[in-house]
Amino acid sequence: MRFVLYSEKPLAECVKTLSERIAQSPTATRPALEGYAEKSGKFALGLSSTVFARFSRKTWLEGSITKDGGGTVIRGEVPDGANPQRQKYILYAIPATGLFLALNGAWLFAAAAVVLMGVVLVTLRGDYYNGDRLLVEIERLLKASPKPPKKPASGKK
């Protein structure tokens, strides 16, 4: 998912804030973030979380911070995964596909399909939750909003 956010903070302060947050150690309410923030405005943040039992997924948000007129614009991309309804469809499709292939005598393909679909489910579920958390973290840290700032009224009457 691509996003565009607007912030009142200057570019240098945004980069400094991101760098400081990446360096912070995790707490119960603040997850550990990996990544970098360059002075040019390019940045990447990674968040890892447990998806199922022992399976975890790391999702990366990549973006850039630029100065545009009187404000700062943050543009980037983050994988958005599959919503819970689609996750449920995939969860139902895994045993159905395996059973269909096994009944047709393709045991090897059935096993490979079940494993592959499990990997896809972990990936999509992890990206769904991590992507949203990363986007919220960016909005909170940089005091950013998807709404562009209001233009100041001109002095003419």
Image (cartoon, rainbow, N blue to C red):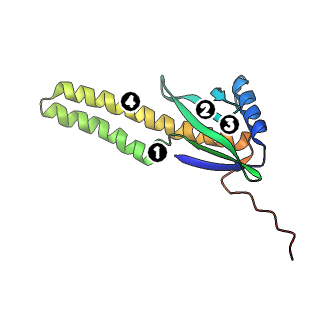
The residue at the point 78 percent across, 43 percent down is 10
For label 4, the SS is: helix
Q: CA distance from mark 4 to mark 2?
A: 24 Å
Q: CA distance from mark 3 to mark 4?
A: 34 Å
Q: CA distance from mark 4 to mark 1?
A: 16 Å
Q: Is residue 151 above or below residue 128?
A: below
Residue to which mark 3 is pinned: 41
The residue at the point 75 percent across, 45 percent down is 143
Q: CA distance from mark 1 to mark 2?
A: 26 Å
Residue to which mark 4 is pinned: 119
Query: What's the residue type where badge 1 is placed?
Result: Pro
Q: Is residue 75 above or below residue 152?
A: above
For label 1, the SS is: helix
Label 2 near label 1: C-beta < 8 Å? no
| Residue 154: percent from left, percent from top | 83, 68
Q: Is residue 55 above or below residue 120?
A: above
For label 2, the SS is: strand
**Lower position in the chain sequence, tag 3 or tag 4:** 3
**Lower position in the chain sequence, tag 4 or tag 2:** 2
Disc marking residue 145: none
**Label 1: how many Cα within 10 Å (few below 14, some 14–19, many 20+):** few
